[in-house]
Amino acid sequence: MPITPNLIERAVFRLNLAPALMLDFLGAESFQALVAAHRLGVFEALDGGALTAVQTASRIEADERGTTLLLEALEALGYVHKKKDGRYASSTTSAKWLPLLGDGIGWFGLMVERLHDLDECVRRGGPTTDAREWLEQIPDGWREFQAGMVALARMTADEIVAKVRLPATARRLLDVGGGHGLYSIKFCRRYPQLSATVFDLPEAMEVARESVAAEDMGHCVSVRAGDFWMDDLGNGYDVALLFNIIHANLPDKNMELLGKVASALSPGGLVVILDQLAGQVFGGTARAVAALMSLNLFNLAGGQAYRFEEVIGWLSSAGFAKPRRIGLRKAPGMSLILGTKAGSGPPA
């Protein structure tokens, strides 16, 4: 939980009588405490009911004093609450949101750790280590990454599928860099006539296959391993998804990729881009999220968040018309950008 100053503390910070920057330091500590609790299985231990610190330590096979200190910190932050008898239980906030985020918390923790050399990244103009190489150096790195993407998909997928209306004639969907495959699964559930192909690197396919099997969607969602920079995407598709892809690339590469996507679509086909957009948010928190996300993307993969005007310029160059933007309520700063491949196609 974010550390929220009370009225007196906010007044002190506004008057510059205390270093407000320390809240950022405490926020970093707070998140690391959450990540540690997640990795230790604290919240899973508390799912069965309230426990004392000693019982929790036994359940997670950890040191009693360390577990006590961690629980006290989690209680101060609002992730757990302490009962009168000394037992700890998950807070209502934790009970609601942590299952939704799931193992994605581990990925968010890795992204924070990746920022340790941000200064060098800024100095040299790009990441110190290639993102793919970095993931391969981390135990279960690709699974951690996909878990983070699954967490984001769980929060936004239903809203996306509700807001993106596919033509009644759409039969084939290509999910470029689709990883876990949840977006394809959701679209196929909403449009029974649709079949989807999830195209991504071999390292991502294990999670995609698990998702398809778990949702019993193997009859309409298939997976295909490949590198969308090197391999042919196929053709004859009616819809193509490019979700959380363009932020990782420089503009010339995005134009190249959109050209390949256009070639894979039939005339009148629809491309749907999901990404963080710069300059599209209002309010202090949303602006900070967008700016920090852009900086993080630069550090992670050498990319950044782009403006809507830039994206529609790439779409136009690749032969897409009728660009439009759809904002997402559940993900401030994230937007859908749709474009239709020029040429005659079947009516909607």
Image: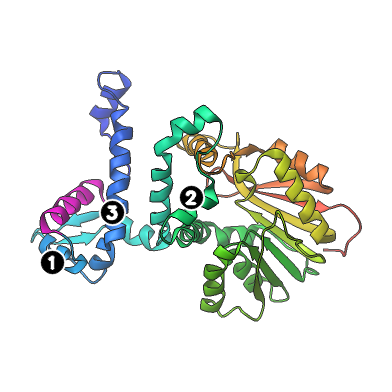
Q: Name the residue: 38% across, 44% down.
A: 113
Question: Where is 293 relative to 226, above or below?
Answer: above
- The coloring applied to the image is rainbow
> What distance separates the C-alpha of mark 3 from that of mark 1?
18 Å
Label of residue 55 in the image: 1
Instruction: Judge depth for marks 3 and 2 and give the one in front.
Output: 2
On whether residue 72 falls in the magenta region, the answer is yes
Q: Earlier in the sequence, mark 3 or mark 1?
A: 3
Question: Which percent across, then down, holds residue 160?
Answer: 61, 58
Question: Where is 259 relative to 150, above or below?
Answer: above
> What distance separates the C-alpha of mark 2 from that of mark 1?
37 Å
Label of residue 36 in the image: 3
**What's under tag 3, amino acid-wise?**
Ala
Looking at the rendered structure, the secondary structure element under dot 2 is: helix
Q: Is residue 338 left or right of residue 318?
A: left
- Magenta stretch: give its range: 63-78
On whether residue 301 falls in the magenta region, the answer is no
Q: Is residue 298 left or right of residue 30?
A: right
Say which residue label 2 marks. 134
Q: Is residue 244 left or right of residue 11?
A: right
Query: What crowding class fits label 2: few (fewer than 14 Cα within 10 Å), some (14-19), or many (20 or more)?
Result: some
Looking at the rendered structure, the secondary structure element under dot 3 is: helix
Question: Which percent across, then down, holds residue 230?
Answer: 72, 56
